[in-house]
Image (cartoon, rainbow, N blue to C red):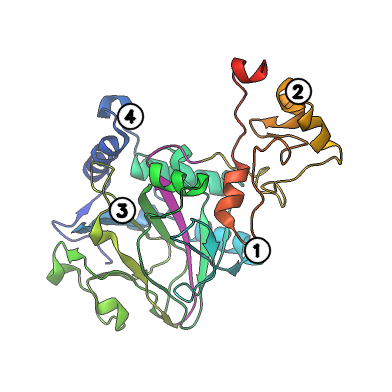
Amino acid sequence: MGAPRPGLSWRGGPLLAFVAGLSCLLLGAQPATATPEYQALEYGNKSRAWIEVVSLHPRAFVLHGFLSDEEADHIVQMATPNLERSRVVDSKNGTGKLDPVRTSSGTFLAKGADEVVARIERRVATATHLPVSHAENLQVLRYELDQEYKAHYDVIETEEKTAVGLQQTANPRVATLLMYLTDVEEGGETTFPGGKWLNKEAQLQPPYTECGQKGVAVKPRKGDALLFFSLHVNGKKKDAYSLHAGCPVVRGTKFSATSWIHVAPFGTVTAQQSQPGFGACRDNNDECPQWAAAGECTRNPVFMRGQGIVRGHCRLSCKVCRVCAAGDVLCERENERPVPALDANDATA
């Protein structure tokens, strides 16, 4: 998937307009409302910038030259000190857990953590025509020898009727933009086992590993990005073709950064919010239980509960958060959400 090929590529405008139309359908908005003015995609590496239609089952595109080498290196250097064993989402309760299906190491970057991160987030929004507010924090992953992520969907399906579980069901991931931060000597393909090539003869780039020979496969190349959609254009039903896997690395090291984008806004986690302990559910004063019992959560809500990104001093006693199990990333993300202001009825109760 190197140089542009006839019938498979666009330099930006037509394909982005097509993606914009899909996004508008998914958001339930008219194109004129969602995208009042066309904004050109600013590639990181303009010398090899083009968009390849990989498949329509699922809807998948490679944005060649999406990142510059300098941007890719910056994200790797920024994330490396904080890498830890990656987790998966438990389908029963929506919490994070260790699982042999995913053997990489990873970390999340705060939204707008620095100018490079903010610039990439804006570029993702331009490429998908889905606003930054709908995206999760960028997750940076490192895959070393034999590490992989076996076939899975990015749409999280959970049986649990918890706040986290209901959130994932009501506001599912609609699109994924996977950015490759390093070249990989062998392996590490992203494969859609049930996918269908747009033009198999023109797009195949053998050799592939055994894993990469299944369905549609994209080889990792530094600076490229893979965009695919997990939902059908009605924004409600999962696209079965979006089942995908990260193949084992055979030689080299694979770094990637993933932006998962939801149908509706998904949190507003900033650099300040991502500091250690920001998502903890606790009281800062031993007298919080007594104050809460006396009605201070409603009489003095900003101090007790907090409001917006301002942390209250008695969050646990005021029940605006929940205590998370160790490593429960989704629970912590839920606790990091801004605290809504009390409505007039609650405040005067």
Q: Amino acid at mark 4?
A: Ala
Name the residue type under label 3.
Ser
Q: Secondary structure at mark 4?
A: helix
Secondary structure at numbered mark 1: helix
Tell me if residue 250 comes above or below residue 172 in the rendering.
below
Q: Position of residue 213 (x, y in %)?
A: 25, 78
Q: Nearer the viewer, residue 26 or 41?
A: 26
Q: Which residue is mark 3?
A: 230
User: Per the image, is 314 magenta?
Assistant: no
Task: Say which residue label 1 marks.
Answer: 82
User: What amino acid is found at the position of numbered circle 2 in the picture?
Assistant: Asn
Across and down, in percent, residue 346 comes to 62, 20
The residue to which callout 2 is attached is 300
Q: Earlier in the sequence, mark 4 or mark 1?
A: 4
**Residue depicted at x 72% and y 26%:** 302
Q: How far apart, in angstroms, are the residues tagged by discs 4 and 1?
A: 36 Å
Residue 34 has which mark?
4
Magenta region: 251-266
What is the spatial separation of the Cα atoms under label 1 and label 2, in whole angstroms?
38 Å
Q: Residues within 10 Å of mark 1 (few under 14, many from 20)?
A: few
228 lies above or below 285: below
**For marks 2 and 4 on the same chain, the one whose residue lies earlier in the sequence:** 4
Say which quadrant the N terminus sits in.
bottom left
Q: The C terminus lies in which quarter of the figure?
A: top right
Q: Are marks 4 and 1 in contact (CB under 8 Å)?
A: no
Q: Residues within 10 Å of mark 2 (few under 14, many from 20)?
A: some
